[in-house]
Image (cartoon, rainbow, N blue to C red):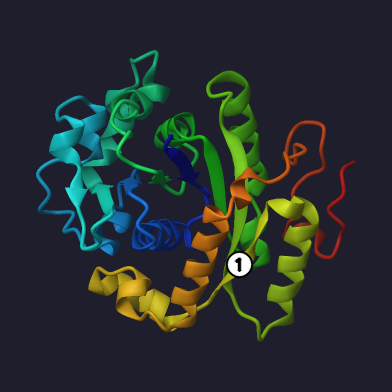
């Protein structure tokens, strides 16, 4: 059965797309047939994996609007075990065109659910917002992965994402689970990064992956060459970190102990820049 993960965080610049691209590449390198779905109109996951987003014949937009089939949309990549459903700026029009569809929240799910049998993993990169496209991503997924930058400002707003997650789980997709939090852009030279990482671990407990993704020049460079980090610089710290994260997923981190409901109505709020150093314990 295909494991389907949404990567979401409404704050931009937290390493969400970088994580989607590089985790997908590492799974493929481990010979796990993987599908990367780019649901961000910016199309950064598409270009980051080496596909020219301006030259593809069909995109996720066409798939969702039923203007193209799955087989017409899916594109192979440099990695044998990795395919991609690409995106570009045209996807931005989907939210307007679907406004009158009462089932608009599950358009993506309906279009891919019968096509995933060949894949062991499916990663869906959501846009940095909590709009209809992100709602489609959450309704299509079984698990939510939250990349979270190790800075206080990045923590602000996570409670909104968690509220959306719980509403989707309660009303639209009961099967979705909170699969994990990925600490990204970590700078071990600063006390602040370590303080934030510790606070996040206190709050989310064993849902935080052990692997921490470092702040890395090589990770920042790789997308401009259209390559995941394992193909751009295999020996770099960023490459080794994503290989380690991939191994955690293969070893079943996302199937660990049940989540107790952090972020739901009966729990405390996510620690933010406004309560630095405060303990993140339920009220």
Note whether 132 is above or below 245 in the view shown: above
Instruction: Label 1: state its secondary structure.
Output: strand
Q: Can I make out residue 14 in this image?
A: no
Examine the image and state in which quarter residue 131 appears: top left
Q: Nearer the viewer, residue 240 or 227?
A: 240
Residue at 30% from the left image edge and 74% from the top image edge: 231
Specify whether 197 is left or right of 223.
right
> Residue 76, how many percent across, how many down?
19, 52
In the drawing, does residue 123 fall left or right of residue 48? right
- 130 to the left or right of 90: right
- Count residues near mark 1 (Cα–Cα under 10 Å), then give few for <14, some for 14-19, many for 20+: some
Q: In the image, what residue occupies the spot 27% across and 73% down?
A: 224
**Residue drawn at (33%, 68%) of the image:** 228
Residue 69 drawn at (x, y percent): 17, 29
Instruction: Please tell me in which quadrant of the rendered image residue 271 appears.
Output: bottom right
Quarter of the C terminus within the rendering:
top right
Relative image position of residue 85 (x, y in whole percent): 25, 44
Counting labels gives 1
Q: Where, by quadrant of the figure, is residue 137 drawn?
A: top left
| Quadrant the N terminus occupies | top left
Q: Residue furthest bottom?
A: 189
Could you say where residue 211 lies in the image, as x and y percent from the top left? 61, 67
Residue position marked by numbered label 1 in the rendering: 211
Q: Is residue 116 something that shows in the picture?
A: yes
- Asked whether, in this view, residue 189 is left or right of residue 137, the answer is right
């Amino acid at each position: 059965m295909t494991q389907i993960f949404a990567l979401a965080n409404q704050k931009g610049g937290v390493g969400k797309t970088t994580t989607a691209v590089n985790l997908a590449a590492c799974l493929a390198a481990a010979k796990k047939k993987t599908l990367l779905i780019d649901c961000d109109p910016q199309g950064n996951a598409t270009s980051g994996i080496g596909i020219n987003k301006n030259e593809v014949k069909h995109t996720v937009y066409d798939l969702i609007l039923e203007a193209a089939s799955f087989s017409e949309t899916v594109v192979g990549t440099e990695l044998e075990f990795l395919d991609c459903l690409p995106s570009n700026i045209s996807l931005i029009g989907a939210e307007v065109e679907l406004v009158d569809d009462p089932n608009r929240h599950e358009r993506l799910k309906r279009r891919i659910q019968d096509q995933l049998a060949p894949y062991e993993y499916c990663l869906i990169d959501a846009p940095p917002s909590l709009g209809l496209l992100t709602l489609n991503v959450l309704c299509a997924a079984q698990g939510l992965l939250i990349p979270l930058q190790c800075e206080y400002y990045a923590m602000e707003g996570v409670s909104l994402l968690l509220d959306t997650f719980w509403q989707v789980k309660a009303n639209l997709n009961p099967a979705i689970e909170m699969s994990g939090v990925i600490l990204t852009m970590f700078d071990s030279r600063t006390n602040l990064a370590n303080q934030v990482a510790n606070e996040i671990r206190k709050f989310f407990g064993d849902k935080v992956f052990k692997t921490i993704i470092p702040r890395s020049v090589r990770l920042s460079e790789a997308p401009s060459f259209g390559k995941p980090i394992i193909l751009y610089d295999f020996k770099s710290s960023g490459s080794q970190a994503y290989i380690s994260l991939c191994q955690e997923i293969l070893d079943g981190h996302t199937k660990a102990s049940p989540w107790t409901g952090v972020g739901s109505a009966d729990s405390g709020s996510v620690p933010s820049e406004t309560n630095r150093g405060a303990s993140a314990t339920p009220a």
